[in-house]
Image (cartoon, rainbow, N blue to C red):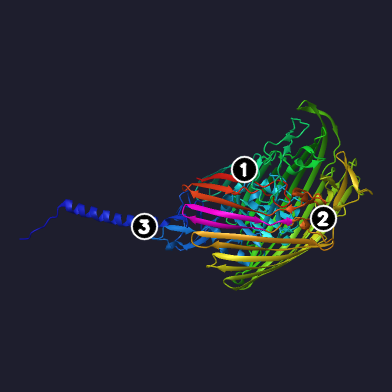
Amino acid sequence: MSIKIIRPLYFINLQRITQVKFIKFIILLLVGQFVHAQQLTVVDKDSGFPIQNVHVEGEDSDKRIISDKNGNIDLGVFSEMELLTFSHVSYVEFELLKKLIGKSNKVIQLQFKSEILNEVFLSATKGKENISRIAEQVAVFSSKEIQNTTPQTSADMLASIPGIKVQKTQFGGGSPVLRGMEANRILLVVDGVRMNNAIYRKGHLQNAITISPNILERVEVIFGPSSVIYGSDALGGVIHYYTRSPKTSEKTIVNSEFMSRVGSVNNEFTIQGGIEVQMKKWATYTSISRSKFGDLKMGKNRVHNFKDWGKQFEYSNNTDKFYNANAVINSNPETQRNVGFDQIDFLQKILIPINKKADIMLNMQYSNSTEINRFDKLTEYRDDKLRFAQWYYGPQKRLLLSTQLNLKLEKKWIDNGTITFAFQDIDESRINRRFDSFDRMSRFENVNVYSLNGDFNTNLKQSVNRNFSYGFELAYNDVKSKSKGEVLEVEGNEIIGVSDTFVVQTRYPDGGSSYISSAVYMDYRQDISKRSTLNTGIRLTNTQLQALWIDETFIKLPDNDIALKNTAVTLTAGYVFKPNKTWQLNGVLSSGFRSPNIDDIGKVREKRGIVTVPNVDLQPEFAYNFEAGTLKYFNDKNFYIGFTAYYTLLNNYIVRAPFVLNGSPTIIYDDEELEIQANVNNETAYILGGTFTLKGNITNNFQTKASFTYTKGRTYDTKEPMSSIPPIFGSLDLIYSKKKIETGLNFIFNGRKKLEDYNISEGIDNIEETPLILHPADADYYYGTPSWQTLNYYARYKATKNIDLLLAVDNIFDVHYKEFASAISAPGRNFSFTILGSF
């Protein structure tokens, strides 16, 4: 008899259910592990805080993803064998094969760029280049460094960069000096567009502040003649502002930021807000900032022992509506009155990808200020009385519209390139009235600049790193100059209107003027070996100037309608030699030139009783430069010491000198008979000097940086000192950082500028702004600029992943001083507090 065993149905179902669940569990476990491997977080190596806006791109993919506010990234769009590049504007690029991202590798740490010296890239060639292949002296200032210096204006920011000295005629300005050259001998560039225009003047130029430091991503500086790449005006160097830019993303991401700061020394209040929208097909960034500044307190600690130097004992309280025939006693002479102003800056950028190989960046920038009083004029005396009741610049307006086409063609002659079309609209005005007069004189200037640039480069042979760059530049400047004279009608202290008008000499040709610049250039850079790099370049530039004077009430020229043309070829050759991994030797031979612009040839203006008049025979000036530099690296290139020395020969250099017009050395100007001068060409002069720098990590938590700059310049023909040569200056920083805290001390020093080192004839160095030594037995004389030192401190605290707090104390010991050639005294002790946020 057979026995049949019957299994219960419930047992069979339970077994099947268990098998199904087990299979699902295994699948979910595997999927979970796979998905888990796609997620990671990007953080700052030191603080451990997540980094937002880190871009991740695959080696063979056009896909791009961006980390969110928590630093998280989903790598699911990339294949396992793709080499991923993690990049951020403030951090060193990092590469990792995706398949290596596993269970134990969920966090990517990025290192801040300034800490890895050999990884810094520059735009000295109008394209990214490693610093180890660049022979010229260069400097880079990152957004974090800008924030830590708490600059009130861009001029203050530039003064923090090693090798740059900044002169200030008034607080609302700042004229950077590079290698003993300033104003129209320095080229200012923003986002690839030259800011220099046909009325950038010789002497001191205050236009550097028309870009807010709060919207800058970084600043790059190239020292010395760089006319092969940048053209005319770059005799002393190039300052390139890069504003913040949006980037696209596979996912829609919205980022916002804000900054707010208050300062005690001049009641500063600054606020800035920005928003970025990232999408797959377009991206946009919008920023608006506003700054408000009041009267400026000077330092009280007079270590130079000149008890009254720089004090303002009286001032004018006249306005366009209020009249006072007399000066007003200043209740606190150490507070500089009438120096405050407001400024607003707007930035709008839109990025539109066309395809994998091209995108368009639309860029709009607008800057506008309130009236800015010219401090040196409002403190100028004549016959022991203040000379001017009013002297101010009208609102300084700057509008920039540009369209930039970025190409990544990877063709034989174009690996990548940029074509930029830009339009700029600049308004300037100057209004003045003397104390003894009801006559108010106003002069207005408008400049429209149209420019087209093309910059391209290709790697001719990857195996030996041969780079060839070339490009072109076209710029057209249209200058309009107007003026008016008004006789004010006054009742008591109220200006009720204008009773009459009169003719006033315009600053520039009243019939209009134009300035055209066109150029082509080529640059070749090759690694001759693993230890050496050779760079050569050539540029051909042509300039054309036209000007027409109509009114001859005050000035009659030999020719009222002029047309000038100038052509020049400039060359450069640079060599980098690295005998081993810790040494780098640089050498540069270069030439540059500056063609006279409308301001050089056609300006009419008065300063301290001397009137500058047009000189239609002015010719270009040329510079021939040699420089040699050395870098010594330590601690695996986390620390370096560098020194650069240079000699620049100026030929046919332009100076201001006494002039005779129509047989007379004087002219009637604003109802006064005054001496005249003009810009003229002299023979030869030289400028030499050097800069010593060091920077790097002392330990994991301590960093330091220092600079020391010496400059000397004299003329060979007239045996005079050159203008704009600053005394010895430098700085020393010690920085401590650990996790959430960063704090630092900054020591700044400036040597004395003696009377015999001043150029007296041109008047640019403003010897009258230095202490006057009264000598009972002999003639009075000026002391020159006294030496000075300041100690400054800042502390930055990462309160949350979104909020940074920054406290700064500038000029801790409240030292009184003036920068060389400056009229206004520098700020005294200043406490500032800044909040930085990103969401």
Q: Is residue 519 visible?
A: yes
Which one is in front, 790 or 533?
790
Q: Which residue is mark 1?
A: 265
Q: Specify the quadrant of the image occupied by residue 378.
A: top right
Q: Name the outermost residue toward the left.
A: 1
Q: Secondary structure at mark 1?
A: loop
Q: What residue is pinned by disc 2? A: 655
Q: Residue at (61%, 59%) from the top-left corner?
A: 408
Tag 2 secondary structure: strand
Task: Report the span colored magenta.
Answer: 729-753
**Which marked residue is nearer to the observer: mark 1 or mark 2?**
1
Identify residue type, mark 2. Val
Q: Are marks 1 and 2 in contact (CB under 8 Å)?
A: no
Give the CA separation, mark 1 to mark 2.
Answer: 37 Å
Whole-percent x and y of residue 697?
53, 62
Amino acid type, label 3: Gln
Q: Is residue 731 magenta?
A: yes
In the picture of the structure, the residue carrying the numbered disc 3 is 33
Amino acid type, label 1: Val
> Dot 2, how many residues are within 10 Å of its Cα: few (below 14), some (14-19), or many (20+)?
some
Comparing 802 with 527, the one in front is 802
Q: Position of residue 453 (x, y in %)?
A: 70, 55
Left or right: where 553 falls relative to 313 = right
Say which label, 1 or 2, has the lower sequence index.
1
- Nearer-N-terminus badge (3/1): 3
User: Residue 784 placed where, x, y %?
Assistant: 75, 53
- Closest to the observer, 490 or 776: 776
